[in-house]
Amino acid sequence: MRTALALPEVRWAAAALLVFLGAVGFSLAGAPEPVVVAAYLLCYLLGGWEPAVEGLRALRERRLDVDLLMVVAAGAAAGIGQWFDGGLLIVIFATSGALEAVMTARTRAGIASLLDLAPETATLLVDGTERRVPAADLVAGQVVLVRPGERVPGDGRVLDGVSEVDTAALTGEPVPVRRATGDDVLAGTVNGTGVLRVGIRRDAVDTVVAGVAAQVERAAATKAGRQLFVERVEQRYSVVVVAATVLLLAVPLLLGAPFEETLLRAIVFMIVASPCAVVLATMPPLLAAVAVAGRRGTLVKDVTVLEALAEVDAVVLDKTGTLTAGRPVVVTVTPLGGRSPGEVLAVAAAAEAGSEHVLGRAVRRHALDGGLRIPAATGFAALPGEGVRARVGDRDVVAGRPELLGTSAGPAAAAVAELQAAGRTAVVVLVDGEPAGVVGLSDEPRPGATAALAEVRRVVGGEPEVLTGDAPRPATALAARLGLSAVRAGLLPADKVSAVRERQAAGRRVLAAGDGINDAPLLAAADVGLVVSEGAGALSLEAADGVLTRDPLGSIAPLVELARRARRIARANLAFAATVVVVLVAWDLAGTLPLVVGVAGHELSTVVVCLNGLRLLAGTRRAGRREAPAAPRERERVAA
């Protein structure tokens, strides 16, 4: 409530409503007419000043919008003594604007809370001394120091050191890659356990991340003109109403008609023809849909996104973090040398106890979840770019990359080759220098992914396409598990945008879902871009039209269905409102429409379309209570 009252639109609308109720109370209590009129005038001022200012501003830009028309219609009603009707018109219009402001502010606040606020600084090396400088000031030729856990501040080449670098934000690859002297690194990637000395090769404005940001800006420009359908016709309709009112007043007077009768007819026409109900026909259902989407875990930036969602007929998806959880898990354990899977997993988890590597954490988490007894380890040491070493009991244990096997072609190498052929990551475990087993890890599909994709096919139609920067082998393997036939792997951000443009050129309306920085241009280029909050950074959040805060895949089909239902209600409202306007206008032109009947019909139609739009809230709440409980997560088993 306090958040809503912080918005000026809400405060003005609330004040106008309170004063309007006071004016009605004064009138019913028989207060002196000047007191009642003064109260209504204050209501007009509180609720109408902002629309009047906006309308006049639009006039200066040679546009005529409904804001000014509503104020004029209310003023016309007051001019013939219908203070109540004009005040009600002002209050309804101001309340609609307040509702829109609340929904928009709530959504943007939720999105803003997800933004990555990490400082962009770098450790610059100058003559052997360290100095903290803004990363934006880095230029080619400088040398920076990147410690464990820090982000690489600029595109460059490793001059000294060995580590593993997490590139998921830029490439979508969930497993860190080894980087040593002579290897290139990119700004925005995260250093692992080693210390790197990096020579900057590009100025800050020319980095890959900066290029992605520029792509986002170019792609987003194509959607800048998107607006509500009713707003596209509002100006023309308003001009027609004003022109018709002037003609209805001027022509009869020129033909000698009585002034008062002609003026009354023109005022009644302006009131009944004013597009209040038409404008409000679309906003309540769309605002209700925004609220329902937020309750379900999807933050939609504004109501125009709902209109675009209703038109979607193609879906493209990123792999890591969208189809998958973006977190590798153990899927197989291949024991060697007569050991059991549990023994191999236990010693590997013991060796990884001091590791912060994503694969090490996955191994340890799997052992703990399986209830294994993990022995104590001593002498832990990270082997940057290779793995970890520790003393477990009286044995020397090493766990890490397959390269630790050397040129061996035994059972361990065969197990590694089999895992890699299936698109999985292999971690070898050596005990006293001999292969003890191979642990297979995979970035597994999100729970319920197959069912969610089936719903996307049913609702949207067509086959979802996977666009990923990941390697072809794991991308194809995952797609096969999920029953997806359309996969494009090894893509750069610009390649993803090109894929979307191809579909749009064929007349398709594209919905895209992704998470990392590499997906920001994709989200901006798509007709509707939805970002997964778990891995989202500031750039992708800004580029997206909405944020998926829970169950990303499972939210897509219900969101599209919700948007289409809101569109159906809006269209029904428009048809009803237009019918009422036509009937009242025809009555006023062909006969004598009493002012009270005209105002009553106009206001009643406005109330009906508002209530019909807001019923979406109650309907979806009841539907939510009828939903069956979600299926339990499948448990992974350790294969022998």
Image (cartoon, helix red, strand yellow):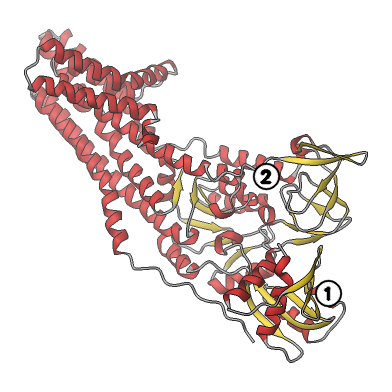
> Residue drawn at (59%, 69%), measured in percent from left and top?
444
Quadrant of the rendered structure where residue 222 is? top right
Whether residues under marks 2 and 1 lie with C-beta atoms below 8 angstroms apart, the answer is: no
Residue type, numbered disc 2: Val
Using the rendered image of the protein, determine whether residue 586 is visible from the camera's viewpoint: no
Q: How crowded is mark 1: few (under 14 residues within 10 Å), some or many (20 or more)?
A: some
Quickly name the residue at label 1: 404
Q: Quadrant of the C terminus?
A: bottom right
Question: What is the residue that sits farthest to the bottom in this orientation?
Answer: 338
Does residue 183 appear to the left or right of 608 in the view shown? Answer: right
Does residue 198 appear to the left or right of 370 in the view shown? Answer: right
**Residue 140 or residue 308, whichever sits in front:** 140
Residue 143, disc: none
Camera-side mark, 2 or 1: 1
Question: At which x and y percent is residue 41?
Answer: 22, 15
Quadrant of the rendered structure where residue 61 is? top left
Does residue 199 appear to the left or right of 377 in the view shown? Answer: right
Q: Which of marks 2 and 1 is nearer the N terminus?
A: 2
Using the rendered image of the protein, determine whether residue 550 is visible from the camera's viewpoint: yes
Quickly name the residue at label 2: 212
Question: What is the residue that sits farthest to the right in this orientation?
Answer: 127
Residue type, numbered disc 1: Leu
Q: What element carries label 1?
A: helix
**Residue 53 or residue 399, whichever sits in front:** 399
Q: How crowded is mark 2: few (under 14 residues within 10 Å), some or many (20 or more)?
A: many
Question: At which x and y percent is residue 410?
Answer: 82, 86
- On screen, residue 594 above or below 246: below
> Residue drawn at (10%, 28%), measured in percent from left and top?
597
Question: At which x and y percent is residue 479?
Answer: 58, 69
> Residue drawn at (51%, 52%), measured in percent from left and top?
510
- On screen, residue 187 above or below 606: below
